[in-house]
Amino acid sequence: MSKVEESIEVAVPVTTAYNQWTQFEEFPQFMGGVERIEQQTATLTHWVTKVGGVTREFDAEIVEQIPDERVSWTTVGGDVHQAGVVTFHRLDDRRTKVMLQMDHDSKGVVDAVGDKLGVVKHQVSEDLKRFKSFIENRGHESGAWRGQV
């Protein structure tokens, strides 16, 4: 099991950053390799990814969600085994620190080599940079789910 920890500051209020992160079906707009996400229930999503020409499908379950604070998940089937949490920290009225921590299991030789080379860490870092650009350019969230799990 490998661990990734990355963070970024975004120039939007904490509620805006959190609300946008709850819009899972929009993740392909800023997450590299994510082809499609389908929100199946309030706590279950189905992911289709394609990285290095390899397509993988899996389900992820939201195991904890506290508005403006955190969203944590774990995979519950499919080709990918991971768990993680993204937390939102108010810096001031217009700035938020977004922190992502993830544990993931490499599958096969190619994944293991990629993991050793820091491919997943790099991908997470780039995804957070794209999230920053996505939300700052919009200036507002595209939707929100304010429920608690």
Image: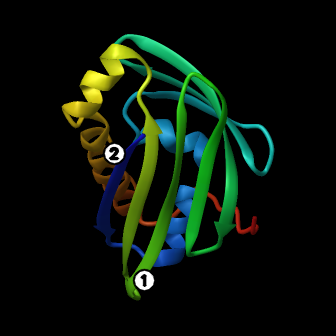
Instruction: Return the x and y of residue 12 as percentages of the image width and height.
Output: 40, 73
114 sits left or right of 14 in the view: left
Relative to residue 133, is residue 109 depicted above or below?
above
Relative to residue 23, is residue 140 depicted above or below?
below
Residue 64, quarter of picture:
bottom right
Q: Secondary structure at mark 2?
A: helix
Gap in angstroms between the C-alphas marked 1 and 2: 21 Å
7 sits left or right of 40 in the view: left
The residue under label 1 is which amino acid type? Answer: Arg
Instruction: Give the labeled residue for mark 2.
Output: 124
Point out the residue furthest to the right here: 41
Quadrant into which the C terminus falls: bottom right
The residue under label 2 is which amino acid type? Answer: Val
Which callout, 1 or 2, points at the residue further toward the start of the chain? 1
Instruction: Return the x and y of residue 123 as percentages of the image width and height.
Output: 30, 39
Point out the residue furthest to the front here: 1
Residue 31, quarter of picture:
top left
As rendered, which of 33 and 112 lies closer to the eye?
Answer: 112
As rendered, which of 131 and 112 lies closer to the eye?
Answer: 112
Instruction: Return the x and y of residue 13 as percentages of the image width and height.
Output: 44, 78
Relative to residue 23, is residue 14 depicted above or below?
below
Quadrant into which the N terminus falls: top left
Relative to residue 43, is residue 91 depicted above or below?
below
Q: Please name the residue shown 35% across and 22% down the image.
A: 111
Which mark is drawn over residue 90? 1
Q: Please name the residue shown 42% across and 66% down the image.
A: 139
Residue 68, quarter of picture:
bottom right
Q: Please name the residue shown 65% across and 72% down the image.
A: 66
Instruction: Return the x and y of residue 127 as percentages of the image width and height.
Output: 34, 45
Which mark is drawn over residue 116? none
Q: Secondary structure at mark 1?
A: strand
